[in-house]
Image: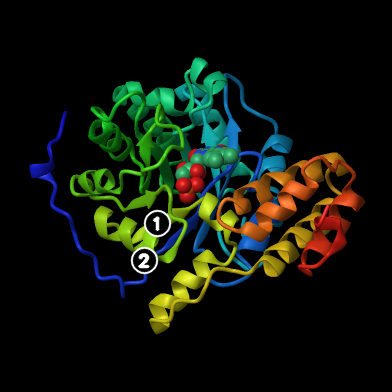
Amino acid sequence: MDYNDAMVEVDVVNLLHSGRIGLAPMEGVIDAATRDLLTRSAGIDWTVTEFVRVVDTRLPPRVFLRHCPELASGDPRTPSGIPVHLQLLGSDPAALAANARQALSLGATSLDLNFGCPAKLVNRHDGGASMLRDPHRLRTAVAAVHGAVGDTLPVTAKIRLGFADRRLALDCARAAEDGGARQLVVHARTRNEGYRPPAHWEWIGRIRQHLSIPVVANGDIWTLEDYWKARTLSGCPDVMLGRGALADPGLASRIRHWQATGERRPSTGWPTKAETLLDYAAMQRNILPQKVVVARLKQWMNHMRGRDSEAARCFQALRRVTELEDFLAGLRASMTPEAPALTA
Ligand SMILES: Cc1cc2nc3c(=O)[nH]c(=O)nc-3n(C[C@H](O)[C@H](O)[C@H](O)COP(=O)(O)O)c2cc1C
């Protein structure tokens, strides 16, 4: 099916309806510690794990627990009580069903299916966004998972607007709904568009008008203005924040504050962001190898530096540092602007 602009009816949503805010799954970036840190202040309503990659076997419990340590408590939530949904990525219906049952037996309370991953390796093996080329297969995958867990667990799906183009966007969205998905997150770009702006929020609106399940708008929400535009153009009350929440860990609570009071708080200052990174290091240094902690800190800081000149300066000063202690010392020094470590 194809569309033209005449078919689009842009819904101007009532922004006083607070809507929900999800924290996006981000492989290699948003782990349990990040989920914990980003849900400490109010704003995020649900989170999703990095994807568990399903090929053709039932994975052992340790794989699920590695991706979702929150399962160990018997009720997968962040320490602040925000639900953690488990994400699966795969294309084989039988393997997805077997792993859905495994997740259920381990205490998962919601399963999300990834049909958006653009990685070449994943797509070559027919996972992630490659499923967007065939809505029938997408429907079969969702139905297999839904059939495996029945109504005990809600099954949700996350798609992009298509693989190479948007022609199958609505068909894929409908396939997810027909397969039994209870919610659909739409990242407003095709797979081939990667992460290049703009995000086509109006396309999410086109999809939303044809579905009866909740549709969640995702892609390029970095600021309060983006939030407003994404909601207005998509007509979706609910959004999901990925890189924007990493770039400004206070974004979700600033949105909430704005909705509640009308006051626009400025974006979070660098010292507070640096403090978040220090907290992350403190949580991970006894769990992950020190070099991995440094790599993860750099990755997070990389998401911060695009919109924050102090973060950019600090990133530049520390980008070749590989020892954790040196990195943390540099980070601490950056919290006072005249710090010698950053004048080099
Ligand atoms: C580094 C990285 C890792 C990602 N990993 C996942 C993933 O595991 N599962 C998934 O569904 N989407 C994944 N995504 C896509 C995000 O969830 C989100 O859809 C995308 O970043 C657009 O939202 P944003 O502009 O708010 O970041 C990833 C994105 C990035 C940049």
Q: Position of residue 340 (x, y in %)?
A: 86, 61
What numbered label is drawn on residue 239? Answer: 1
Nearer to me, 2 or 266: 266
Q: Residue 125 in the image: x percent, y percent?
A: 52, 16
Instruction: Count the marks.
Output: 2
- Mark 2 is surrounded, within 10 Å at the Cα level, by few (under 14), some (14 to 19) or many (20 or more) other residues, namely some
| Residue 153 seen anywhere in this rendered image of the structure | no
Rendered residue at 61%/21% (across/down): 57
**Residue in the foreground of this view, choosing between 31 and 317:** 317
Characterize the local packing of mark 1: few (<14), some (14-19) or many (20 or more) Cα atoms within 10 angstroms.
many
What is the residue that sits farthest to the left in this orientation?
A: 6
Q: Nearer the viewer, residue 219 or 310?
A: 310
Residue 277 found in image quarter? bottom right
Query: Could one spot residue 269 in this view of the protein?
Result: yes
Q: Is mark 2 within 8 Å of ligand 1?
A: no
Q: Earlier in the sequence, mark 2 or mark 1?
A: 2
Mark 1: which amino acid? Val
Secondary structure at badge 2 equals loop
| Marks 2 and 1 close (CB-CB < 8 Å) | yes
Name the residue beneath numbered marker 2.
19
Decide if residue 165 is on the left or right side of residue 49: left
Residue 230 x/y as whole percent: 33, 56
**Picture quarter with the N terminus:** top left
Gap in angstroms between the C-alphas marked 2 and 1: 8 Å
Instruction: Using residue 167 as the reference point, say whether residue 197 is left or right of it.
Output: right
**Mark 1 element type:** strand
Q: Amino acid at mark 2?
A: Gly
The label on residue 28 is none
Compared across the picture, whether 154 is left or right of 253 comes to: left
